[in-house]
């Protein structure tokens, strides 16, 4: 850990009221061919905070964070502001963005096999990240790569450095990706579906690892998932996205005890119950709308069992229901008491 990282570790884990958040998205809009896939997103990530981003495929979760880091392919139109400690990085130079990526904000992709270079030894790939972000080379870089492998729980770390991705298991490759993300000692770790391709036992191990590292290194965490139960394990706050918008957000406890948007309730109702009496799942009918076929009002209105004519007039804004809870449903206060799944 270098001196600057030590200084950050000595600071408060949470942002105090009135202080500048580590990262803030202001009215972030991402469009392809003039069709918005992320529509006016506002979000703050505090120092040391763990935030879960949840929603079905096509909700705009991954696109949001690829846009934040300037990693979208094609010709997207990205508007709004992304403030890293108060400084906008949306319009930053490529050199500045390269310093941010991996150095201050690191991204773990959901499929390590397609993210790692198949013809390079995994140790060399981590060493390259150490060279770029911390200027390490030679024996010092190899020693640090080995330390990172040990930190993320890769057994026989010295020998595993010389392995190729195809020689490691899926769980070990994901640990390599985490080690690579940690190489730049980031302040914010964005984990995009980090357990999707893994079996349930390895999923639990990876989540426990991410949570332990976040606390030990005083990092902020954004955990992207389609599974509310996954983010509930490690996140302080949950953001529910649908069709490029935030439908509901709140503390994990508040959102699970009093979900106030029909979409959030649908996600909870579709989740299997692991304990107690077996129950029939209640899937959400229909599909996430395509950007070119977006409803004029609430995007969830065509699939919502609580919809009323007023829901189809205009997209509802997020409203405060409690100090730590917001919902973008005009009927939030009218919904029946949620009895769980």
Image (tube, rainbow, N blue to C red):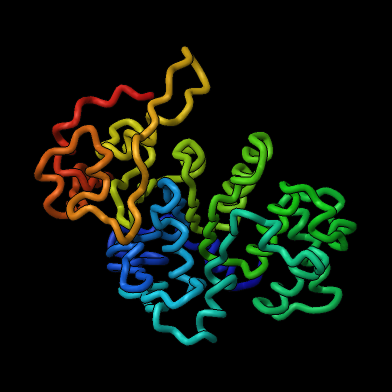
Q: Tell me what residue is drawn at x 45 percent, y 49 percent.
A: 57
Q: Is residue 146 above or below residue 327?
A: below
- In the picture, the quarter occupied by the N terminus is bottom right
Q: Tell me what residue is drawn at x 55 percent, y 68 percent.
A: 7
| Residue at the far right in the pictured view | 159
Could you tell whether 151 is left or right of 273 in the image?
A: right
Q: Tell me what residue is drawn at x 34 percent, y 35 percent.
A: 285
| Residue at the far front in the pictured view | 293
Q: Is residue 63 above or below residue 133?
A: above
Q: Position of residue 287 (x, y in %)?
A: 37, 44
* Nearer the observer, 280 or 208: 280
Q: Tell me what residue is drawn at x 51 percent, y 18 percent.
A: 275
Q: Position of residue 235 (x, y in %)?
A: 46, 45
Could you tell whether 95 is left or right of 139 in the image?
A: left
| Residue at the far left in the pictured view | 310
Q: Position of residue 16 (x, y in %)?
A: 34, 58
| Residue at the far top in the pictured view | 277
* Nearer the observer, 238 or 72: 72
- In the picture, the quarter occupied by the C terminus is top left
* Nearer the observer, 217 or 81: 81
């Amino acid at each position: 850990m270098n001196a600057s990282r030590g200084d950050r570790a000595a600071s408060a884990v949470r942002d105090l009221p009135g202080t500048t958040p580590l990262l803030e998205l202001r009215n972030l809009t991402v469009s392809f061919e003039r069709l918005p896939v992320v529509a006016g997103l506002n979000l703050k990530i505090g120092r040391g905070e763990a935030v879960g981003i949840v929603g079905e495929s096509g909700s705009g979760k991954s696109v949001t964070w690829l846009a934040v880091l300037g990693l979208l392919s094609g010709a997207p139109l990205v508007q709004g502001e992304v403030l890293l400690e108060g400084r906008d990085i949306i319009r930053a130079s490529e050199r500045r963005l390269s310093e941010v990526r991996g150095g201050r904000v690191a991204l773990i992709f959901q499929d390590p096999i397609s993210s790692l270079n198949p013809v390079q030894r995994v140790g060399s790939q981590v060493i390259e990240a150490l060279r770029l972000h911390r200027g390490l080379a030679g024996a010092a870089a190899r020693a640090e790569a080995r330390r990172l492998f040990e930190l993320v729980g890769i057994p026989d770390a010295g020998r595993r450095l010389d392995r190729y991705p195809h020689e490691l298991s899926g769980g070990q490759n994901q640990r390599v990706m985490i080690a690579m993300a940690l190489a730049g000692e980031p302040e914010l770790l964005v984990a995009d579906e980090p357990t999707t391709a893994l079996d349930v036992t390895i999923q639990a191990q990876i989540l426990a690892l991410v949570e332990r590292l976040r606390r030990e290194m005083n990092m902020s965490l954004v955990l992207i998932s389609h599974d509310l139960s996954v983010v509930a394990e490690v996140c302080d706050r949950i953001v529910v996205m649908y069709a490029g918008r935030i439908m509901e957000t709140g503390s994990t406890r508040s959102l699970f005890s009093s979900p106030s948007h029909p979409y959030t309730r649908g996600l909870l109702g579709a989740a299997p119950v692991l304990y107690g009496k077996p129950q029939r799942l209640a899937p959400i009918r229909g599909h996430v709308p395509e950007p070119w076929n977006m409803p004029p009002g609430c995007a969830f209105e065509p699939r919502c069992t609580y919809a009323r004519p007023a829901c189809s007039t205009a997209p509802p804004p997020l409203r405060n229901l409690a100090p730590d809870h917001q919902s973008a449903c005009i009927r939030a206060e009218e919904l029946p008491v949620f009895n769980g799944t």
